Image (cartoon, rainbow, N blue to C red):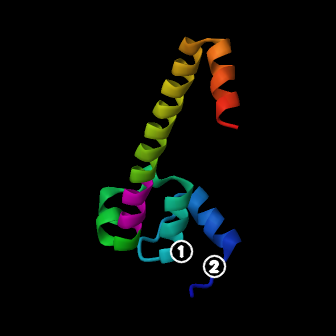
Amino acid sequence: MVPIELEKLTKQLKNNEIDKKDKAMLWSLFIKNPERMGEKEMSENEDIKRAKEENQKQFIINLYKMKMNIEDIAKVAELGKEEVEKIIKENK
């Protein structure tokens, strides 16, 4: 457990007073903006490095889901109202 002084931490982050040895500060910086973390900080902190990799994977998964939703909407639009209503009734 790491005690966090939120007021102090917020002030330090706002003033760019970043202590690269302070885990709470590094995590706060990562949570606020993962892209702001420098390569050096990322390579030195394995937990943050793994979290950033997971964040990137989740972003790709979300993009794929959005693409699939758009394709589904396009298919429904091509079918026409009567065909969509027929499919809905058949699957109730």
In the image: residue 45, left or right of residue 26: left
Frontmost residue, 69 versus 58: 69
Q: Contact, CB < 8 Å: mark 1 with mark 2?
A: yes
In the depicted structure, whether residue 17 falls above or below residue 21: above
Residue type at numbered disc 2: Ile
Viewer-proximal residue among 63 and 15: 63
**Where in the figure is residue 46, as x and y percent of width and height?**
34, 72
Segment tinted magenta in the rendering: 48-55
Residue 78 screen position, x and y as percent: 54, 12
Question: Above or below — where is 85 with respect to 52?
Answer: above
Q: Is residue 4 left or right of residue 60?
A: right
Number of marks present in the image shown:
2
Q: Is residue 69 above or below residue 3?
A: above
> Which residue is the site of mark 2?
4
Q: Secondary structure at mark 2?
A: loop
Which residue in the structure is indicated by mark 1? 24
Q: Residues within 10 Å of mark 2 (few under 14, many from 20)?
A: few
Q: Residue at x 57, y 88 (%)?
A: 1
Considering the whole magenta stretch, tell me its main secondary structure.
helix
Query: Residue shown at 51%/35% (left/top)?
Result: 66
